[in-house]
């Protein structure tokens, strides 16, 4: 993007990521005509991007990583099932919003208690070397170690395939930031997600 070729817009079916500093007019034209999805930007270009897209809503988030790679050396915790790809039958009994978030995940770990799923850690997105962590626990089962159990199980399964976890947490959602810290994640980057006016 731009006459100097100093920026790129990388897109998949759900997200667009802006890398570098684009020409403002080209960015406005591209976003207006073709994007149709949220846009992830680095913090140092936020002011320019927000000026170019004033009607868009900005939501800062923090990218986390573990200080050391996950190793594969622990047996599965009791009641945890790892499924790749995710078997939809494992979602039966979970609330609609949790099922919707996990649907279609390439892999997940589910904690089952008394034949009922109570927590899930799913791969939200993945590359050859990284996977994005998504964790949900049903309300009555929170603060009982279920999130840790499903995360550890899925992290080891993904490590066996050569992928390490990353965690993206919105700055205005403290529970996600606190859980990331509790699982040993550390902040490595600050970014911003811009949402189109229609997603306000």
Image (cartoon, grey):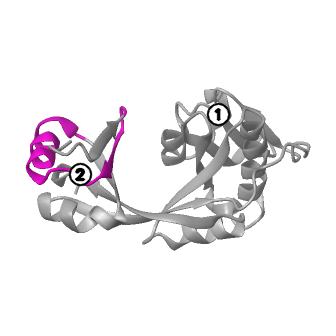
* On-image quarter of the C terminus: bottom left
Among the 4 quarters of the image, the one containing residue 10: top left
- Residue at x-position 91% and y-position 43%: 75
Disc 2 to disc 1, C-alpha distance? 28 Å
- In this view of the protein, which residue sits in the foreground, 26 or 131? 26
Is 170 on the left-hand or right-hand side of 11?
A: right
Residue 185 position, x and y percent, is: 66, 64
Res. 30 visible in picture: yes
Among the 4 quarters of the image, the one containing residue 45: bottom left
Res. 54 visible in picture: no
Of helix, strand and loop, which one carries label 1? Answer: loop
Can residue 76 be found in the magenta stretch?
no
> Label 2, on which residue?
199
* On-image quarter of the N terminus: top left
- Residue at x-position 22% and y-position 39%: 36
Residue 102 position, x and y percent, is: 55, 40
> Label 1, on which residue?
107
The disc, 2 or 1, on the residue closer to the chain's N-terminal end is 1
- In this view of the protein, which residue sits in the foreground, 139 or 103? 103
Is 180 on the left-hand or right-hand side of 124?
A: right
Per the rendered image, the range of residues in magenta is 12-36
């Amino acid at each position: 993007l731009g006459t100097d070729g100093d920026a790129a817009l990388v897109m998949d079916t759900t997200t667009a990521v802006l890398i570098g500093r684009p020409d403002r007019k080209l960015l406005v034209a591209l976003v207006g005509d073709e994007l149709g999805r949220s846009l992830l930007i680095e913090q140092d270009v936020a002011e320019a991007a927000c000026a170019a897209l004033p009607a868009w809503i900005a939501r800062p988030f923090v990218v986390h990583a573990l200080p050391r790679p996950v190793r594969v050396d622990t047996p599965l915790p009791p009641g945890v099932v790892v499924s790749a790809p995710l078997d939809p039958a494992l979602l039966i009994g979970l609330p609609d919003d949790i099922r919707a978030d996990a649907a279609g995940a390439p892999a997940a770990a589910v904690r089952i208690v008394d034949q009922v799923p109570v927590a899930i850690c799913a791969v939200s997105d993945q590359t050859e070397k990284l996977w994005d962590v998504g964790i949900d626990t049903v309300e009555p089962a929170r603060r009982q170690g279920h999130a840790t159990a499903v995360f550890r199980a899925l992290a080891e399964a993904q490590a066996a395939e050569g992928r390490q976890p990353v965690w993206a947490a919105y700055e205005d959602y403290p529970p996600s930031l606190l859980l990331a810290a509790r699982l040993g994640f550390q902040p490595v980057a600050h970014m911003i997600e811009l949402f189109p006016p229609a997603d306000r």
